[in-house]
Amino acid sequence: MWIAGKAACAAIPAGALPLEMISAPALSADGQRIAFEWAQDLWVASSAGGEAKRIVADPARDAYPRFTPDGKRIVFSSDRSGSLQIYSMPVDGGETIRHTFHTEGNELECLSPDGTQAIVRGLRERHGYRSTRLMFVDLVTPRRERRVFDASAHSAAWSPDGKSMLFCRGGEQLYRKGYQGSRASQIWRYDLHSAQFTSLVQTDTESRSPLWLPDGSGFYYVSHKSGVGNLHRLKFGEKDVPLTVYKEDGIIT
């Protein structure tokens, strides 16, 4: 991907600036576009590559973009008010709507399958190691946030059928490469109707960033069983399958 600029390199048009070290990439439901954070602004480009268009250019940081399921809007976090809050706007530009106002802030985690709700993460009246809570935020009708459950959690992923969510508990700092121990991130499933928890991946190494398979039959995640981050696929009732075999520098999430 690239933008108009003063630099050029192979396969990039003359006068274009290549984008490097982008963060928080998110794919649209149809797989045609990708949204991401770069230089504290939000950008959208074709998933096949090409020119990136900046859609948010605010002096503050704008981060964690997510496409709504219909691909028409982007939901994101921004600290333009002094703390990270949830906003949304049309993909092609237009009025920005603010959805949250909690003074401790909100980091966007995921959207519901119908795009009417978000799950956000933030500190809520608790202190200690990774003490963030997950909350529901209504993106249609302004109302107070609702806590998902009263336990520390992060990396939420809403199931395609809307009935459950994956999330992580624990997790050591990413600079502790190859960490093994009681703080290792583990993956759980939470049933939104029965309020039941199920442990899915629990080892003494890091298991991070669960992402549902499109049909809901399982999920992808990043495992550090090999000492570095590698992508795995776990279908319910089947054996865990590694999909990458990095040896030195693995996947960072």
Image (cartoon, rainbow, N blue to C red):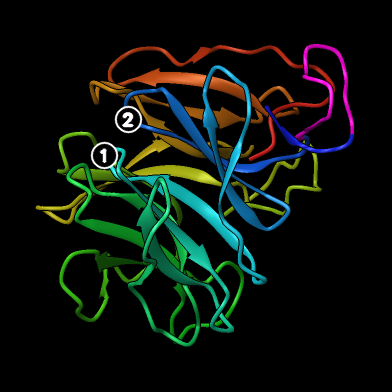
Horizontal side, residue 239 vs residue 139: left or right: right
Residue 212 point in image, percent of width and height:
35, 30
In the structure shown, which secondary structural element does the residue marked by tag 2 occupy?
loop
Q: Is residue 18 visible?
A: yes
Q: Nearer the viewer, residue 211 or 237?
A: 211
Disc ID at residue 3 = none
Quadrant for the N terminus, please. Answer: top right
In the structure shown, which secondary structural element does the residue marked by tag 1 occupy?
loop
Q: Amino acid at mark 2?
A: Ala
Residue range highlighted in magenta: 7-19
* Residue designated by label 1: 69
Q: Amino acid at mark 1?
A: Pro
* Residue designated by label 2: 29
For mark 2, does the 10 Å Cα neighbourhood hold few (<14), some (14 to 19), or many (20 or more) residues?
some
Horizontal side, residue 72 vs residue 225: left or right: left
Q: Nearer the viewer, residue 14 or 149?
A: 14
